[in-house]
Image (cartoon, rainbow, N blue to C red):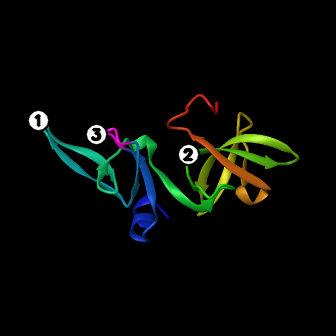
Amino acid sequence: MDMKELVKKGYKFRGWDAVGNKGWVYGDLVHNKKVTKTGLEDRVMVGGYEVVPESVGIFTGLKDCNGHDIYEGDICSISCFSRLIYAKIVYIYFKAAFYFNGEGCQFPIDYASTFKKIGTVYENPDMIK
């Protein structure tokens, strides 16, 4: 299922406000055009706000150990495999997974005994390399 089908089904998204510097905005995802001095240009909107396209992430349906919603692109500390892992959350096939820092392996979030949101790849790009 592609992003347009997810939007039709009412999935929740977040994106970084590209114009008003309001931080994260939440809601429906819309792809449309805006009028500029040079003509029409593509834009991505979440919850009625224009957002940075690279920042958009879908809600995974999960909450961390502190009750915070987990979105694609979040960075979490994850207790798994008898160690603490810092990983990026990805959303594949309608399930959340974590992506090992530098190891190139994806595992279902179900493997984690606990996980806690500590940042986002958009705000903290150097946290996960």
Q: Which residue in the structure is indicated by mark 2?
A: 73
* Residue nearest the viewer, comparing 7 with 80: 80
In the image, the segment drawn in magenta is 17-22
* Earlier-in-chain disc, 2 versus 1: 1
Q: Is residue 87 above or below residue 71?
A: above
Please state the horizontal and vertical placement of residue 31, each as a whole percent of the image.
31, 54
In the visual, does 39 lie left or right of 99? left
Q: CA distance from mark 3 to mark 1?
A: 17 Å
Q: Which class describes the residues within 10 Å of circle 3: few (<14), some (14-19), or many (20+)?
A: few
Which residue is the extreme one toward the top?
Answer: 126
Which residue is the extreme one toward the left?
Answer: 37
Q: Which residue in the structure is indicated by mark 1?
A: 37
Q: Is residue 34 visible?
A: yes
Mark in the foreground, 3 or 1 = 3
In the visual, does 97 lie left or right of 16? right
- Most common secondary structure along the magenta stretch: loop
Which residue shows up at 55% across the image and 33% down it?
124
In the visual, does 128 lie left or right of 53? right
Q: CA distance from mark 2 to mark 3?
A: 21 Å
* Residue nearest the viewer, comparing 86 with 53: 86
- Badge 1 marks a residue whose secondary structure is loop
